[in-house]
Image (tube, rainbow, N blue to C red):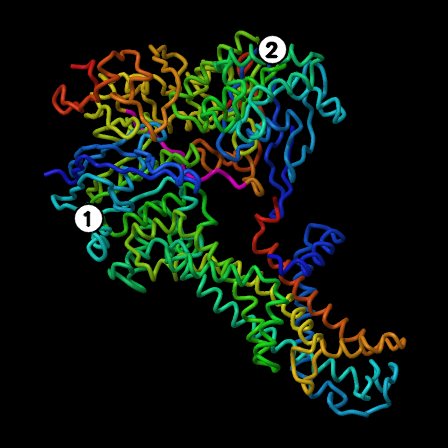
Amino acid sequence: MRVYYYTRDGVVMAVDNVDLSMKQGETIGLVGESGSGKSTLGQAILRLVPPPGRIIGGKIIFDGLNLMKLSEEEMRRIRGKRISMVFQDPMTSLNPLMRIGDHIVETIMAHDNLTRKEAEEKAMKILEQVGIRSERFMDYPHQFSGGMRQRVGIALALALNPDLVIADEPTSSLDVIVQFQILDLMKKLKDLYGMGMILITHDISIVPGIADKVALMYAGQLVEFADVKSFFNEPLHPYGKALLESIPNIQYSDQKLKYIPGNPPDLINPPKGCRFSPRCPYATERCREEEPPTIMVGRRRLVKCFQY
Amino acid sequence: MANLTAPRMITSMLGKISPRRGAEGLFVTIGLAIILTFIFMAILAPILAPYDPNETRVGGLYESPNPKFPMGTDRLGRDILSRIIWGSRTVLIVTFLSMVLSSACGVILGLISGYVGGKFDTILSLFMDSLYAFPGLILAIALAVMLGQGIIPVTVSLTVVYVPIYFRMIRGEVLSIKESLFVEAAKAIGAKGKTLIFKYIFPNVIPSIPIVLSLNAADAVLTLAALSFLGLGLPAHIPDWGFDLRMGYGALTAKIWWPGTFPGLMIVLLTLGFSLFGEGLAEILNPKLSRR
Amino acid sequence: MPLLKVIDLKKYFPVQQSFLERLLSRKLDYVKAVDGISFEAEKGEVFSIAGESGCGKTTTGRLIVRLIDPTEGKIFFNGADITCLSGEELRKLRKRMQIIFQNPYASLNPRMKIGENVGHPLEIHGIAYGREKEKLVMEMLEKVGLQPASKFYNAYPHELSGGQRQRVAVARAMILKPDFIVADEPISMIDVSLRARILELMIQLKEELNLTYLFITHDLAVAKYISDKIAIMYLGKIVEMGEKEVIFSDPKHPYTNALLSAVPVPDPNVKRKRVMLKGEVPSPINPPTGCRFHTRCPLATDICRREEPKLVEIDDNHFVACHMIK
């Protein structure tokens, strides 16, 4: 998968040669800093990269279907119905003049062949599942708090019982306690509906609580892909290692943080060779010259580094 | 800004024709070229103009364009080309003077009003808004009638028309910048009011001035022409496109097109030059606005 | 004598009303952003205020550096009452008390070079001009790790990354060699990989310049890492306060408990007992009567609804405001 942004300053290689696969019902935590391309990758799966971004190449195989080859109309039927999205601020995706319940009813009726009555019943049920009482069905989005809005966002994403939900920083604008509530809710609903999920986040701390796998991105590339346990026990890529050592952990009492020197690279002119090499403590001459291949370590673990 | 709709329409139409990317650079270049040509013409008027613009009967009456009089002669037998060249001087002097005066007044008042706030701001804003609510041309006509003919009265009435535009823009910017974090940070390091205005607020409003300046200039050219067209602008001995347009207009019915067309063309060209320059500048200086 | 002492500090903001609302009711509503908090910070320590958004922690920081005026209460700095300072005296106070803001993208003047941004405090207070100013700024830039300093000196803020800008903000706050710094969420808007660098820098400068920090954060893991003492705020009130070790190992207030257990841990092997609270923080315009936390508290009883609990010292230097904790 490649997505480039054409700006007047040059071509930003937001996502560059990323290969990723997931199984039905699995949850992947897609982690990276701002500008790592994690959100762009999420948008690209739904073919919703905003201009001046363009998908340059690659394939998205979803349930045996190459999404890149579908017509716009076929793609529209996939969006929402089979793959849906949860946004950081659901307020931006809700129509302020439309009642909460109607949002969900409309979504259901746009895809499913149901009468209004049936759709309303279904919407009520979903709202209840996300913890919104039925008397709030007639309220408008602005009457909802941040956490409640995110619950509506989740209800909207689940309305059509999709196979895959892409959640882009769903808890980043929420406080810890509400974040905890929402993550817990998402976990419960995931078990209930059995759908797969891609959780896009910059906060690696929330990943172990909800995901099965971690996909770590740096500067538009996937640098490590592993199951949660093995990644957090022993991250293979130096970036993953450094990242875990740089975040304060409330479990420790005498933690010594190690920081990552330098800055994230400029994606118009990414560094030659491995993109992490200018900041990597283990970097060799080869890392600065050649791009490392993505190597399979163990049975299902990928890492993009010369060390392995 | 209601006053600026005409020039804006022209450029937005052009923007649709030319490709989006890089168009702003082209706008600025073409606009600047036009403006510079006119400035050049105005400065070198005594050398460039083949005849005295006020001398009657240098040729026949209503001579059509010919090698001796490339734009023909008017009803008094004056050379139209010479009148156009001298007229550019008049237009540019009035436009530049009124722009300098109105921007200076508007910017200073807007800065103070926005920063001080309170009653002073309320009263001044109310006054400026009521001036602004008048259609520019009608206000200019009223003032010109009161002040009489001549370069200075016309300049003053144009100045009054454009002060509220600068005032409103600057005041609005000051109000938002005043609340910004870096101004709060400056307070936290102990900066005084004067320092806040001149080092923190003013430099951040400067970028929007040239854009409005240029667009207003385009509008001022039109307003001045309109005043002269109505006979309210300048005395007859000062060559002026608007007045000539009026005179030529009368001859149109007799199928004599040259005395009206050339001054009219000049008005359009100069307006276009200023608007292109202003719009292009806006795109370049405020790329965030246009990228959306 | 504590360096900073705050007694019963309050800040009420009037709620913006429309014209019609003003006609219909005489009563003005207030957002009780900070509603009677008291604490002390000793010289050389890091005192953290932690809580969720809307708890009043940022307002507290702004009140203390006197960017906004308190509705009630007193602030003592180094023994002197600074609550009502104004004009020249307030400007003098700025030399000793500085603030670092959350948003490094908005806190620097975009039209000033980095060197001028950092050096301006020196000029304002008449400490150094021209060459001498430049020398001091260069030293400071080196100290915050912006090297080579001469390159950064002439750059404009938009040419720098968020992490670098925050280092500039740190440099600007430190250049007057203050005693006390309010750091308002200084790392929350910075790229994850650069946060540790800023934290380390702040700790290192604190040692070097013998500073005292009031560190405001929503992230308890960060609070635990950097502080000596912590106060937990909820809806404008301090609910629990004490030494870091005590707060994290033996939290008493049910809100502190819930807050701590909601903090995500980057370790899949840890299985924690987790307390989940229902609902969200109520509006600070009409906060609940009695204990403000009673609407969500698992331990709430009648007295909690009626009476507001006082912040009492239950153990040496450990304060809790809860009827159920004795």
User: Outermost residue toward the left?
Assistant: C1
Question: Residue A2: x and y, percent?
Answer: 65, 31
What residue is pinned by disc 2? Answer: A122
Question: Residue C62: x and y, percent?
Answer: 29, 42
- In the displayed structure, A139 sits above or below B172; it is above
Q: State the extent of the magenta-drawn residues as a range.
A: A255-266
The mark found on residue C320 in the picture is none
On whether disc 2 and disc 1 are found on a single subunit, the reply is no
Q: Main secondary structure of the magenta part?
A: loop
User: Outermost residue toward the top?
Assistant: A192
- In the displayed structure, B59 sits above or below A248; it is below
**Residue sitting at 48 percent across and 38 percent down?**
A264
Tell me the distance, in whole angstroms, between the alpha carbons under discs 2 and 1: 60 Å
Q: Name the kind of residue labelled 1 in the image.
A: Cys
What residue is pinned by disc 1? Answer: C84
- In the displayed structure, C323 sits above or below A265; it is above
Q: Quadrant of the N terminus of chain A?
A: top right
Task: Answer yes or no: is residue A286 visible.
Answer: no
